[in-house]
Amino acid sequence: MKKTIIRLLKLLAVFCFASAVSIIFFYSNDSQGIKADAASKVDLNYLMKKYPDGKYWNHVGMSRNNADGWTDKPCRHYLVGGWYKPAGTCNSFYGIQCWGFVNKLANECYGTNNYSQWPRTTLSKLKPGDAIRFKNNSHSIFVTGVQGDIVTYGECNSEYSNCKIRWNVRTTKTQIAKSLTGVYSAPSELTVNLTNNTELKTTTVMYGKKLEVQGNASGGESGYQYQFSIMKPGSKSYEVIQEFGISDKLSYIPTPSGSHKLKVIVRDRKGKTDDKILGFSVLTYRFINKSTIEKNRVKYGDQIKINLAATGGSFGYNFRIMAIKPSAASPVILRNYCPYSTYYYKPWETGTYRIFIDATDREGRSQTVEYDFTVTADKLVNTSVMADNVKTGDTAVLMLSSKGGTGQYRYCIEVKHPWRKEYITLRSSYSIDTFNFHPTKDGVYYFKVTVTDRLGNTAQKKFKLTADSAVKNTIQYETNRTADTGLKA
Ligand SMILES: [Zn+2]
C-alpha cells in the first residue's frame, strides 16, 4: 500500500512537472493555442501575393495604418544622427517597418502578435516560418526556406529608408551568425505549396527559331517533373509536346506564326500539380517575293532565265509562273508549283511578253511580281542561189537557204517555163535545202523562191535560168553555205 502511494506520489510529481513544463511551453510558444505540429494557416504563396515583391508596406497617401495592404510609393524616412527616423507613413503591427512586417506575416501564419514572444532557437534548428533579428539588432526577417547553409527570407525596409517589400532574398547561416541577435522559433513550419514558377525569357519567337523554356517550381515535395503542351493559333485545345519526366527543359520550334499558348504542368514527388499558362507569339519577317528575270530583251530562239526567290514569311516557298504572250490578252500558266530556284522559258513569239511570278509561303502569304521582256528577231533574208545558165538536159541546182526571221523555214518554188505565161508551183515544203531542175527545152526559165518563217514572215528571191543546148559545160554554183537553213533551229 505504501509502495503504491509512493508510486502515485511520484507519478503525480512527474505529471505536475510535465504539466508545468507544457504550460510554460504552451504559453510561451503559442499564446493563440495553435498546435506545435500543425502547418501554418496560410502558405508562402498567399503571403507573396498579398504583399507583392517590390511594393511598399506603408500608407503613403492614406490617412491611417495599412497593415493588410501596400502602396506603390516608398516612405521617405529621414536621417537623424546616422539613423533613419520613421516617416509618418510607415505601417504598424505590434511594431513598425521590418519588425512590424515580420509580426504581420507571423500573425497571418500563426495568429500570434509579436514574434519576440516566440521561444528562442538556434540557427542549426532554423525552419521556414522562424523569425530572425540580426545586423546588430537593427533588422528583422521572416524565414521562408532553409537548405543546408542557405537561408531564403522575406523582409521589409532592408534599406532602412523606404519600407520596400522583398521576397526570396538569399543569405547564409554563416553570414547571419556574424551579427545575430536572436532566432525565434515559429509554432510550426511554414507551409509552402507547390508553385509553378516557370517563365518565358521572351514572349516573341522569330519563325523557324527555337523556343527554349526552363521548368521552374518551388514548394511541395521536390523531385519535380514537367509536362509541356501547346495551343496553336486558331486551335482550342492543347497538344502535349513533351511528357513528364523527359526533361525539365523544352526546346521547340513553334509554328505557325501567330499567338500561341504554352501550358506547363509541374508535378511533385507526391503527385501534386500546378499549372501555368504562358503566352507567346511567333513572328515572321515581312514576306517579299524577290524573283527576277535575267534580262528584258532576248533573241528569238534563246531561252530566258527566271530566278525564283523570296524572303521572310514562313519557309517552304512555292512559285507559279504565268505569261501574257504578245499575241494574247490573258495570261497562261507556264508552271504551277515550281519548287526550283530557276526556271527556263523559251518564247516562241516575237514581241513583248509579260511574266507574272506568284510566290506563296507555307502559311499562304502571297506576293506577285511582274516583268516585261521583248523577243526580237533579225529581218528574214532569203539567201538561196542558182546558176544563171545551163546546158539543156543537164541539171540546174537551186540551193535553198535563209537567215533571220524566226526559223523553221518553209520554201515554195515556182517556175515560169519559156512556153508558159504563168508560174506553176514545183515544190512547197519544209526540210529541203536543194532542188534539182532539168530544163528540157532551150529558153529562159524564171524562178520565184519564197521562204516563210515560223511566224509567217516571208522573203522572196527571183532567178533567171537560160537553158541552151549549145553550151558545152554546165557551171554550177560552188558556194559556201554559211547561211542557216533554219532546219536545225
Ligand atoms: Zn516606412
Image: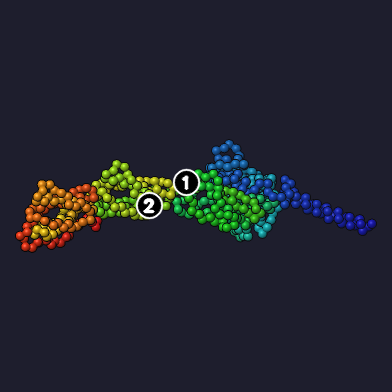
Give the spatial CA distance, label 2 vs label 1: 27 Å
Mark 1 residue type: Gly
Identify the mark at residue 258; answer none if there is no mark. 1
- Spot occupied by residue 194 in the image (x, y as percentages of width and height): 62, 51
Q: x%, y% of residue 104?
A: 64, 45
Q: In front: 261, or 148?
A: 261
> Where does label 2 land, which residue?
338
Residue drawn 23% across the image and 50% down it: 454
Q: Nearer the viewer, residue 410 or 16?
A: 410
Horizontal side of 445 relative to 95 (left or right) equals left
Q: Under tag 1, what secondary structure?
A: strand
Res 142 visible: no
| Residue 292 against residue 148 in the figure, above or below | above
Q: Residue at x 66, y 45 (%)?
A: 108
Residue 430 disc label: none
* Residue type, mark 2 in image: Cys
Give me the residue at 64% from left, 55% from top.
269
Tell me if residue 305 can be seen: yes
Task: Answer few, some or many: residues within 10 Å of disc 2's Cα (few below 14, many 20 plus, some between 14 and 19).
Answer: some
Quarter residue 327 falls in: top left
Secondary structure beneath dot 2 equals strand
In the picture, the quarter occupied by the C terminus is bottom left
Whether pointer 2 and pointer 1 mark residues with C-beta atoms closer than 8 Å, the reply is: no
Image spot of residue 241 (x, y percent) = 54, 53
Q: Is residue 487 left or right of residue 442?
A: right
Position of residue 381 in the picture relative to residue 262 (left or right): left
